[in-house]
Amino acid sequence: MPPKKGSPKKITKKATLQPVVTERIHVSRLLHLDAPELELHAGRGRLRIAVYAEFFPVAYRDNGAYKGLDIDLIEGFCRSAGLKPQYVRVRDWFDAWKKPSKWGERVDLAIGGIGRAAHRTSSSIEWTLPYFTVRRTIVYNLKNPIRRFPEDVTGVVVGTMGSTGMNDAEERLRQKFGDAAWDHLDARWNSPDAKDIQDLLDGKIQGLMRGSFVGRAIVTQHPKQLGMAEPWDASPKSLGPYGNEVFAFPCRRGSGLAAQLNAYLLRASHNGDLARLVRKHNM
């Protein structure tokens, strides 16, 4: 009997990886040698991926092509699993992690620098192991530096509404400015990276709240105009279940993707591929 219209298609892909343990991506358990069957939304070996592409250098568009750390990781996984990536662009960063849980969206996982946090839980979502640990920093214009945060803040700093970085910035700025903290904060919703960086270059804002690796990549592009503060750990109130801020991939529960991606991330960490990708993107 043919499958019902709209039902997922099964793709069998048996893994032959030997289990390894690495501290780099916080792995504390072994994976089974045989990965489960993949049950995906699309047929013909396609993997449908929701991507938030306004997060340089993790996921962004360059001349119409998707690029970044997450793109390289997922496309490497697809090559190893015999899958073809099919991207579905997401404009709303705040709810990007939920996309695999919504049947009508018809996506299997989401990418774009998505932090695994205590409030991002769903019975329909299964997270992969973390693949990157994030620290906080602020990128500033060298003409008006913020070498110490929040002590050197005199103007306005920009962050992403609802993000760990923005929540951490608000808590720290309240220590200096009290109830006037929001006079120095601009929480932007789905603002393109290019606009935020240009505003900083033009002196319209004093600082840009970012993860330390993103900050480093931005400064690398504009070394004569921008600098960044020494990275720090986010405040405990902003952290996820791992005790620090980590990136992971939310997958549709029951698809089998999380287990196969975990095996791939383990191998990439063990053989140095993950570290090479991090260096490639100046992170």
Image (spheres, grey):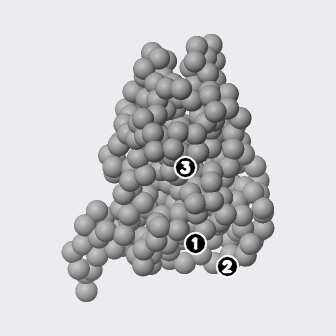
Q: Is residue 59 above or below residue 147?
A: below
User: Which residue is pictured at 58% across the width and 72% down the height?
Assistant: 259
Secondary structure of the residue carrying tag 1 is helix
User: Which residue is pictured at 38% across the width and 63% down the height?
Assistant: 98
Q: Which three-letter amino acid code belongs to the residue tagged 2?
A: His
**From the viewer's perspective, is 226 left or right of 60?**
right
Query: Can the viewer see residue 39?
Result: no
Q: Quadrant of the C terminus?
A: top right
Label 1 neighbour load within 10 Å: few <14, some 14-19, many 20+: many
Frontmost of labels 3 and 2 is 3
Q: Are marks 1 and 2 in contact (CB under 8 Å)?
A: yes
Q: Which three-letter amino acid code belongs to the residue tagged 3?
A: Glu
Q: CA distance from mark 1 to mark 3?
A: 36 Å
- Residue under numbered circle 1: 259
User: Closer to the N terminus: mark 3 or mark 2?
Assistant: 2
Q: Residue furthest left?
A: 5
Counting the numbered discs, the total is: 3
- Residue under numbered circle 3: 171
Q: Is residue 227 above or below residue 85?
A: above
Label 3 neighbour load within 10 Å: few <14, some 14-19, many 20+: some
Image spot of residue 155 (x, y percent):
49, 26
Q: Are marks 1 and 3 in contact (CB under 8 Å)?
A: no
- Residue under numbered circle 2: 32
User: Which residue is pictured at 27% across the width and 80% down the height?
Assistant: 3
Q: Is residue 17 above or below residue 192?
A: below
Image spot of residue 277 (x, y percent):
66, 42
User: Which residue is pictured at 66% across the width and 52% down the height?
Assistant: 133
Frontmost of labels 1 and 3 is 3
Image spot of residue 142 (x, y percent):
61, 17
